[in-house]
Image (cartoon, rainbow, N blue to C red):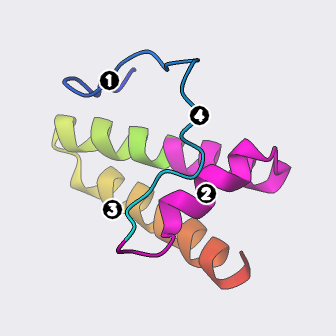
Amino acid sequence: MTIAFAPFAHEPDEARDDDDEHGEDRGLDFLDETYRALRDGDEPSIHFVQYLARCFQEMASAAAAGNKRALKHWYQLGRKLVDEETDHG
């Protein structure tokens, strides 16, 4: 299964370097910190994002199928991953 992010999905622009581009009026958030860890090649962060992506993918599949039990299972697993990452990250 592939998740499509149209209308904002596009190929990366290799010429641009947006590494530090984020809202001036807000601090770094979870997505910013995760991006920076991935950009820097942090292996635990890479695995975390892969696991979390799997949870999102399975949650979407369960929701599409109307399987509330599976949706809750994958949500709880994702919640545990996020809680552990934010407590120790």
What is the chief secondary structure element of the magenta stretch? helix
Quadrant assignment for the N terminus? top left
State the SS at label 4: loop
Q: Nearer the viewer, residue 11 or 42?
A: 11
Amino acid type, mark 2: Thr
Amino acid type, mark 3: Lys
* Residues packed near mark 3 inside 10 Å, few (<14), some (14 to 19) or many (20 plus): some
- First of labels 4, 2 by sequence position: 4
Mark 4–mark 2 Cα distance, whole angstroms, equals 17 Å
Report if residue 32 lies within the magenta region: yes
- First of labels 3, 4 by sequence position: 4
- First of labels 3, 1 by sequence position: 1
Name the residue tied to disc 2.
34
Mark 1–mark 2 Cα distance, whole angstroms, equals 19 Å
Amino acid type, mark 1: Ala
Q: Which mark is residue 49?
A: none
Q: Residue at x 34, y 47 (%)?
A: 59
Q: Residue at x 31, y 53 (%)?
A: 71
Amino acid type, mark 4: Asp
Quadrant assignment for the C terminus? bottom right
Name the residue tied to disc 3.
72
* Residues packed near mark 1 inside 10 Å, few (<14), some (14 to 19) or many (20 plus): few
* Residues packed near mark 4 inside 10 Å, few (<14), some (14 to 19) or many (20 plus): few
Q: Residue at x 61, y 48 (%)?
A: 49
User: Which circle, 3 or 1, is nearer the viewer?
Assistant: 1
Q: Nearer the viewer, residue 7 or 83?
A: 7
State the SS at label 2: helix
User: Which circle, 4 or 1, is nearer the viewer?
Assistant: 4
- First of labels 1, 2 by sequence position: 1
Name the residue tied to disc 1.
9
